[in-house]
């Protein structure tokens, strides 16, 4: 019974597919998988938007949306109808073709990333050997769509927002990749389902998640920072800094295209949070051995929602960074830390089991962290800021 | 010549052609990404999954972005002011390119009948690639690492302001 | 029929397009785009020969393509850095204007 519940979606798909002729079954199964992904994540997007607005409202001592439906829970429906019925305004001077293509490229690239994420036991669309590489390749393609959106609008705020976004995404893609490499090194595979399998083991009822190792913990923290910057979330939301550049690269978008950007941003967050959960938090595996009977997909989506709550909490807490702080933080702190973390992961592997590796790895990580923090603090120039202008 | 092959080839070549002929430089860069994506599809069709994904990650994610950044930083997105499309330079360039293609095409078509029959798809795992890179090809790998580091430093120094302050 | 000549023809055509672009355009960035196309055409050849060659299990052409991609990335970074630096001196990216050795 419990086995069946764990595999309920797989069984449902196989049951639906069996009514078709044999040649069509493989294709139909894939199509059903794709439909499931395209249905589930926008629904999650609707839930998370209302969650975010209400959560942020509470943090700012107000109610948040509470007019549509019970407790304002149908707010996303109203938002959706509004977005769909709005007039689609395209600026007169805009580059129409590129302006039209940008949101499509973004949404397609973002959804492609899900095809390699294992969302439960046997629940992965394409278990590729180079799955992680595929995920990052799709993530890299979103940068181009952001640039296309900003440039084609022929609006200086859009262009500034796009340049900021692209510079930020390129800078933080390096630590994102390098912090994931530590997990790849230990699991010995780029396939995400094999990385989950490597973590799905238990000693004394506790799982072998990578977050419970020194390098895994540091890796998860660095990964989360890079992920927040990669998805342009607060405190790294300069590309959309309302007080400076209106709405950044999607200033000139309205109606359905704007909704697509909004969707793309949130779905991108889901995919990157899912990747973080897969790499460091054991993906769909249960947090305790005695909880293994709970269906695996509940754990995956549970971890995803916890990550979303964390994102919302941070958005409600942290002020926005300045552009130079953002870049300095990436290149002078996060990237060196990920390099050290990679080294620590290698040491962890080669020292072998025992308490020595715990002491050595923690000592290196904390030592480097303290040293770098000291250096950065000492170098901080307090006083009048000098402005430099682009030429 | 399967239909898929023809579509991908058309896609790639159209992208390449647009990349070198369009007036607006940013459009050229975007057309270049179309051509590069088409090539990535070719690599996937040729069972080189790893190279295909690396192509998307490096070319579309990094090189294309670098190109558009350079275009915007040098403000060269306006169409170049050249006298007429058929200049002597244009004619010479196209003739040379056509000659090169003629020679290559002739060589390929001449040698085509000598080819063996289609071989089975080699199954390349990432593990094999890693073993090869760390074993037989470790020296080139190290040299590429050195090259990339020096290119990183070199690019920063070249693009840096001369009065000493970075960027 | 062996599909190799098809791939080689596409690569040759792409190479010729890149060459034409590099020879005819006057904007230094567009010349670089042409060169990138030529490099990519060479990569396609490498992969096609690896796939249909006698020893695909040796991975030679495959790894050659990976190294070629890495080198091309370095080339693009340095080349575009040079273009930006020249633009700062001469206020142009027209390669016809870059005919002096003095800055």
Image (cartoon, coloured by chain):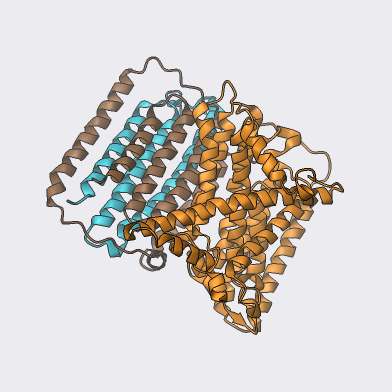
Chain colours: A orange, B brown, C cyan
Q: What residue lies at 61% left-to-right and 76% top-to-bottom?
A: A293
* Residue C100, horizontal then vertical, whole percent: 45, 26
Residue C32 placement, left or right of C7: right
B118 or A166, which is in the foreground? B118
A50 or B10, which is in the foreground? A50
Residue that protrudes farthest toward the front in the picture: A19
Residue B131 placement, left or right of A74: left
Q: Is residue A178 above or below residue B90?
A: below
* Residue A107, horizontal then vertical, whole percent: 54, 44
Q: Is residue A391 above or below residue A281?
A: above
Q: What residue lies at 44% left-to-right and 64% top-to-bottom?
A: A14
* Residue A55, horizontal then vertical, whole percent: 78, 52
Q: What residue lies at 79% left-to-right and 43% top-to-bottom?
A: A67
- Quarter of the figure that contains the N terminus of chain A: bottom right
Residue A134 seen in this snapshot: no
Residue that protrudes farthest toward the right in the picture: A61
């Amino acid at each position: 019974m419990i086995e069946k519940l764990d595999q309920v979606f797989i069984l449902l798909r196989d049951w639906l597919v069996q009514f078709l002729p044999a040649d069509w079954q493989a294709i139909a199964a894939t199509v059903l998988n794709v439909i499931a992904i395209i249905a589930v994540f926008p629904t999650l997007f609707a839930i998370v938007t209302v969650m975010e607005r209400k959560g942020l409202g509470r943090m700012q001592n107000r109610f948040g949306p509470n007019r549509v439906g019970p407790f304002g829970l149908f707010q996303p429906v109203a938002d959706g109808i509004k977005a769909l019925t709005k007039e689609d305004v395209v600026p007169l001077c805009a580059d129409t073709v590129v302006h039209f293509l940008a949101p499509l490229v973004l949404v397609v690239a973002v959804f492609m990333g899900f095809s390699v994420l294992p969302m439960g036991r046997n629940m992965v669309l394409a278990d590729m050997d180079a799955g992680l590489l595929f995920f990052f390749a799709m993530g890299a393609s979103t940068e181009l769509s952001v640039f296309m959106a900003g440039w084609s609008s022929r609006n200086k705020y859009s262009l500034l927002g796009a340049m900021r976004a692209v510079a930020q995404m390129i800078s933080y893609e390096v630590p994102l990749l390098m912090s994931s490499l530590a997990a790849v090194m230990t699991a010995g595979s780029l396939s995400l389902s094999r990385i989950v399998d490597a973590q799905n083991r238990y000693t004394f009822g506790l799982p072998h998640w990578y977050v419970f190792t020194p390098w895994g913990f540091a890796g998860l923290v660095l990964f989360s920072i890079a992920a927040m910057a990669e998805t342009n979330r607060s405190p790294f939301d300069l590309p959309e800094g309302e007080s400076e550049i209106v709405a950044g690269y999607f200033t000139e978008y309205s109606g359905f295209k704007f909704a697509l950007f909004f969707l793309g941003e949130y779905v991108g967050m889901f995919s990157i949070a899912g990747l973080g959960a897969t790499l460091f938090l054991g993906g769909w595996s249960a947090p305790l051995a005695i909880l293994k009977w709970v269906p695996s997909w509940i754990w995956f989506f549970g971890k995803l929602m916890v990550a979303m709550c964390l994102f919302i909490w941070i958005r409600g807490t942290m002020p926005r960074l300045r552009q130079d702080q953002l870049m300095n933080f990436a290149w002078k702190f996060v990237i060196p830390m990920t390099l050290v973390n990679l080294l620590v992961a290698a040491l962890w592997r080669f020292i072998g089991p025992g308490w020595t590796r715990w002491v050595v790895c923690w000592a290196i990580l904390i030592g480097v962290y303290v040293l770098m923090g000291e250096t950065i603090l000492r170098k901080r120039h307090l006083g009048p800021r000098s402005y430099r202008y682009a030429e | 010549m399967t239909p898929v092959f023809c579509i991908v080839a058309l896609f790639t070549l159209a992208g390449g052609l647009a990349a070198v002929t369009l007036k607006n430089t940013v459009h050229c860069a975007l057309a270049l990404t179309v051509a590069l994506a088409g090539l990535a599809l070719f690599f996937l069709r040729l069972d080189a999954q790893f190279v295909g994904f690396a192509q998307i990650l490096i070319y579309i994610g990094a090189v294309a972005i670098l190109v558009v950044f350079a275009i915007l930083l040098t403000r060269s997105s306006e169409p170049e002011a050249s006298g007429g499309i058929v200049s002597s330079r244009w004619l010479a360039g196209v003739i040379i390119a056509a000659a090169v293609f003629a020679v290559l095409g002739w060589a390929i078509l001449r040698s085509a009948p000598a080819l063996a029959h289609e071989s089975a798809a080699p199954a390349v795992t990432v593990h094999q690639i890693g073993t090869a890179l760390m074993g037989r090809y470790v020296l080139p790998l190290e040299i590429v690492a050195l090259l990339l580091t020096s290119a990183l430093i070199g690019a920063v120094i070249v693009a840096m302001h001369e009065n000493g302050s970075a960027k | 029929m062996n599909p190799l000549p098809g791939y080689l023809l596409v690569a040759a055509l792409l190479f010729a397009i890149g060459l034409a672009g590099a020879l005819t355009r006057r904007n230094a960035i567009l010349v670089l785009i042409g060169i990138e196309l030529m490099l990519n055409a060479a990569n396609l050849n490498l992969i096609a020969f690896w796939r249909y060659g006698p020893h695909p299990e040796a991975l030679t052409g495959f790894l050659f393509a990976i190294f070629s991609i890495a080198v091309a990335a370095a080339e693009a970074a340095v080349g575009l850095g040079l273009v930006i630096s020249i633009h700062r001196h001469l206020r142009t990216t027209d390669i016809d204007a870059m005919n002096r050795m003095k800055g």
